[in-house]
Every structure is written in structure tokens, then in C-alpha cells.
């Protein structure tokens, strides 16, 4: 069987992590940590009146190519914050998405919003990196992990004071996430094996999330009408990158997506 996109990314990510660990061992990296914060700003930011927006800093995409390759993190995240985003997602995967941990550090220095490290997290080393770079949360993709790895990384992230957005894209993955007792489930309308988008995925899987779970819809969200439909269905938050990054004014794009007005 030919490797899928996700297979290739995980393999490359594992090699990259091993290379970084060879330069700076886990013990040396962990020595830089300060005590874990008590507040959980990411999860709290997603529970509000109306739908919450996780606005994403994203330079490129494996499915669409360059989006905004020369984007300045400071400019983008400050525009998102001023326009009313509840949190920011920062892509740190370098090979397909053009991101880096430096982008996460720059975002932390530039805005006060809760930050999600958006990457293919497969190793505890990446959790420590995320905390040190200023993340409040990390993405854990069920399709990239076996159930035991998911639970282990989830627990270790919690010990570090990090929230986890646990991503699923089909019924089986939703069952694994629910069985793992996670707090925040992201339903990705994009299949990471084929990169195809089905806008109905989030609406279909939403009903399987237990009461009290925070549900985030991801991918294929481009208009205020999309947001209205998801909010009416009971989705708590949306994660949007490309639709915002392609616009000349990302802050105005946030207002258009949420149906809000910029301050006069």
C-alpha cells in the first residue's frame, strides 16, 4: 500500500524530532521549564456565548500550496486579536506548512491570546518544545497515534499545563477520542490521508461527542453562513486558517466570518 500524506508527514516528523533530540537531549530541554501554569486559558477561551474562533497563522498548505509565504506572524496574530478571535493556532510544521517554533515564539511575544501549537505531535519532546515556545495547547491527531500513545501524550501534556485539541475525522476516531476521556475534540472536515474535504463531517460526528465536551470544527469553513450553520448545530468553536490568510486584511476577514463589525 502506498503511504498516505499523513504517513509521510509522521515519518518526516519523527526523523526531525530525533535530530533535534540528538542536539539537545530531553533532560536538558526539560531543565528549561518553569512550573506549569495553573490557568487553562485555551479551553476557557472556547467556552463563551456564541461560537469561538481559533484563527490560524498558516503560510502554506499541502493541498493548496503557498497561501501567504511572506506573512509576518506579529502582523497576523495582532490583527486576529484586535478583530475578536478567541485564540490563535500557529503552524509549526516546516516542510509542508512553512511553519516553525520561531513562529510560535513570535506569536507569544506579539499577542495575549491563548496559543495552539498546530503540528503533528507524536513525541513527548514536542510537548516540552511547545511549552517552552509559549503554547497553551497542542494538537493531538488520533489518526497519527495509537490509542495508548494518545492517552500517554494527553496525560503528559496535562502535566505540563497544556490543553489538548484532539482531532478526529471519522466515527472510529471519534470513538477512540471519547473513550480516552478528552475535553476538547476537533472534528476535521479534511481527511488527512487523502486531503479531501467533506464539509458535512463535523455536523455528522458532532452528535457522538459526550455532553460537556468542547467541539471544534476544522477545515472547509469559509463564510458567515458556514459559521451560522455550525453554531446552530451546537459546535462550540471553529478553527480557520486559509480563508483568513488569503484575504488582504485578515482582521476584516475575521469580522466577515463572524458577522461582527470593526470598531469605527
Image (tube, rainbow, N blue to C red):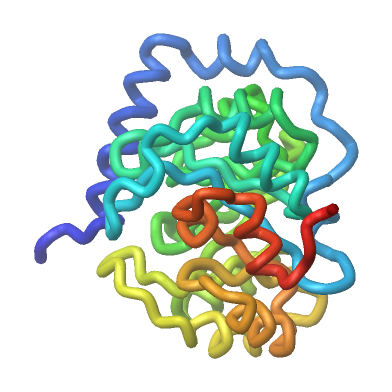
Q: In this rendering, would 31 be left or right of 5? A: right
- Residue 125: x and y in percent read 51, 29
Q: Residue at x 65, y 56 (%)?
A: 252
- Residue extending farthest to the left is 1
Q: In this rendering, would 241 be left or right of 110? A: left
Q: In this rendering, would 165 be left or right of 170? A: right
Q: Residue at x 50, y 54 (%)?
A: 247
Along the line of sight, the residue nearer the viewer: 61 or 33: 61
Q: In this rendering, would 172 be left or right of 256? A: left
Q: Residue at x 46, y 74 (%)?
A: 189
- 211 to 264, vertically: above or below: below
- Residue 101: x and y in percent read 51, 27
- Residue 3: x and y in percent read 16, 58
Q: Residue at x 36, y 71 (%)?
A: 191
- Residue 249: x and y in percent read 57, 49
Along the line of sight, the residue nearer the viewer: 245 or 262: 262
- 224 to 137, vertically: above or below: below
Along the line of sight, the residue nearer the viewer: 202 or 160: 202
Amino acid at each position: 500500500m502506498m503511504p498516505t500524506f499523513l504517513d509521510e508527514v509522521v515519518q518526516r516528523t519523527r526523523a526531525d524530532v530525533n535530530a533535534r533530540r540528538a542536539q539537545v537531549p530531553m533532560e536538558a530541554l526539560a531543565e528549561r521549564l518553569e512550573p506549569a501554569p495553573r490557568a487553562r486559558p485555551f479551553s476557557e477561551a472556547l467556552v463563551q456565548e456564541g461560537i469561538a474562533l481559533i484563527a490560524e497563522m498558516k503560510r502554506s498548505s499541502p493541498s493548496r500550496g503557498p497561501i501567504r509565504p511572506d506573512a509576518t506572524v506579529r502582523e497576523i496574530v495582532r490583527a486576529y486579536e484586535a478583530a475578536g478571535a478567541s485564540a490563535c493556532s500557529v503552524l509549526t510544521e516546516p516542510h509542508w506548512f512553512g511553519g516553525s517554533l520561531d513562529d510560535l515564539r513570535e506569536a507569544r511575544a506579539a499577542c495575549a491570546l491563548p496559543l495552539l501549537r498546530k503540528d503533528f505531535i507524536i513525541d513527548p519532546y514536542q510537548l516540552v518544545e511547545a511549552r517552552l515556545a509559549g503554547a497553551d495547547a497542542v494538537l493531538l491527531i488520533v489518526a497519527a497515534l495509537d490509542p495508548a500513545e494518545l492517552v500517554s501524550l494527553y496525560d503528559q501534556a496535562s502535566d505540563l499545563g497544556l490543553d489538548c485539541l484532539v482531532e478526529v475525522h471519522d466515527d472510529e476516531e471519534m470513538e477512540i477520542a471519547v473513550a480516552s476521556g478528552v475535553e476538547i475534540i476537533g472534528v476535521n472536515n479534511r481527511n488527512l490521508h487523502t486531503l479531501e474535504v467533506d464539509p458535512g463531517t463535523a455536523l455528522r460526528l458532532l452528535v457522538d461527542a459526550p455532553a460537556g465536551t468542547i467541539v471544534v470544527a476544522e477545515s472547509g469553513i469559509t463564510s458567515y453562513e458556514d459559521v451560522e450553520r455550525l453554531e446552530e448545530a451546537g459546535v462550540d468553536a471553529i478553527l480557520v486558517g486559509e480563508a483568513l490568510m488569503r484575504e488582504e486584511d485578515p482582521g476584516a476577514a475575521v469580522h466577515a466570518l463572524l458577522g461582527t463589525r470593526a470598531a469605527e
